[in-house]
Amino acid sequence: MAEAAPRVRAIIEATTRPIMPPHIKLRHDASRGRWIILAPERLFDPDDVAVDVLKLCDGQRTVADIAEHLAKEYNAPANEITADIVEMLQDLADKGVVKT
């Protein structure tokens, strides 16, 4: 029996281009009026800001690009938003919800 390769932790930084894997789905639950993340045998309930970030995680934009976009939208400092996004995406990457 072959041993499985050890899982390598994705590290999220400002230059990272995060994306949600194909088996993870961000869906709007119309009956409850909220967004959910569907993962195999798991369900996540992201807040509104997390949803805004995840909608921009397309594998093309960097975390810095996402932060810049949201800084304009929320009229907030991009460096503070970047730090918050890195922390949030790192947590989700550790759970397998986003990858790099």
Image (tube, helix red, strand yellow):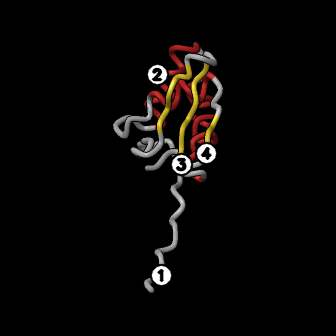
Q: Earlier in the sequence, mark 2 or mark 1?
A: 1
Vertical placement of residue 63 versus 42, above or below: above
Quarter of the figure with the N terminus: bottom left
Q: Which amino acid, by three-letter code, is at mark 3?
A: Pro
Q: Amino acid at mark 2?
A: His
Marks 1/3 in contact by CB < 8 Å: the verdict is no
Which residue position holds label 1? Answer: 3
| Image marks 4 and 3: residues in contact by CB distance under 8 Å | yes
Mark toward the start of the polypeptide (1 vs 4)? 1
Residue 71, percent across and down?
Answer: 54, 20
Q: Which residue is mark 2?
A: 69
Q: CA distance from mark 1 to mark 4?
A: 25 Å
Disc 3 residue crowd, few under 14, some 14–19, many 20+, Cα 10 Å: few
Q: Which mark is residue 24?
A: none
Image coordinates for residue 73, horizontal then vertical, percent: 52, 14
Which residue has dot 4 on it? 42
Which one is in front in this view, the residue at disc 3 or the one at disc 2? 3
- Give the residue furthest to the bottom: 1
Amino acid bearing label 4: Arg
Work out how far the residue at label 1 is from the one at label 3, CA to CA, in angstroms: 22 Å
Relative depth, front residue between 12 and 36:
36
Residue topped by disc 3: 40
